[in-house]
Image: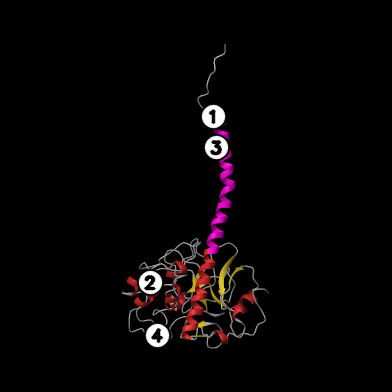
Amino acid sequence: MRKHVARSAFTLIELLVVIAILAILIGLLLPAVQKVREAAARSQCQNNLKQIGLAMHNYHDTNNALPWGTPSGAAECCWGTWQVLILPYIEQQNLFNLYQSWGNNGGPSYQASPNTTNVTTHRLKTLTCPSDTPNTPFSNITSHNYAVNYGATDNNTAMSGDGGAPFGHGQSLTLPTISDGTSNTIMVAEVVQGQRKDLRGFTWWADASGITTYAGPNTSLPDQIYSASYCDTGMPNPPCVAAAGKASFYSRSRHTQGVNLVMCDGSVHFVNNGINAQTWTALGTPQGGEPVSLGN
């Protein structure tokens, strides 16, 4: 009569085969998981822009104009941006009430107490793309991921009154005066949060509060900032150069192949990096008379 001998363990070869199979399965599944995560992040980003678009329209209904990009004159730099003005319309009325001296350079700036204590060190989920890495360049003040359309010019000279952009310093347009059509004019687009001391996405501050449509999304052209101290070209930051008296920030994202944006009619779109450059620039002007749209 035979005795049954039980096997106590896998052989080394069997174990190696199992490990190899698991490694192959993980290698196949990981890209799929990453794609699902990015799809979810892109969808959340688009939802954020939808909420911003609604906030802009509600602000317009209340005030009969879009919010100013920033104050003008001596208060332009550091005494508020459009981001503060829409706080009540993204369920942040308390933060809006706590913010002091919007447009008044006689009071505290965005980087002074009590604004830092109460408002500008807060991270706003609606203004943060989940595909990016949150950053606080200095004093725990938060960067974010969405900026208004300042047209095909540098951010320091952005003017809406000449029809060059929906938003400007100390001025903005009303929706009915957007003669190119609200569905053909960019309202707000994505930007990246510069890492470490880089100030891209630092939208409490005037220079970073808007984009230029001079070049297309995720362009290889470098952004411009006034000081090399705040222009970090290390990975994963996009290209940047120091340019005295200049601020030019292009629409960029951490998504693959393009950026999300919301048009002045409130519609949200994903725009591919390969969009025609002239079309992109034309989408930045509200009264340019160019016969283009996102379908061109």
The disc, 2 or 4, on the residue closer to the chain's N-terminal end is 4
Q: Amino acid at mark 3?
A: Ile
x and y percent of residue 143 in the render?
43, 68
Q: Amino acid at mark 2?
A: Thr
Identify the element where label 3 is drawn: helix
Disc nearest the viewer among 1 and 4: 1
User: What residue sits 58% from the left and 46% below the top?
Assistant: 27
* Badge number at residue 120: 2
Disc nearest the viewer among 4 and 3: 3
Up the image or down, 31 lies above or below 249; here it is: above
What residue is disc 1 on? 12
x and y percent of residue 59 in the render?
47, 80
Disc nearest the viewer among 2 and 4: 2
In the foreground, 123 or 246: 123
The disc, 3 or 1, on the residue closer to the chain's N-terminal end is 1
Which region shows up in magenta?
A: 14-43
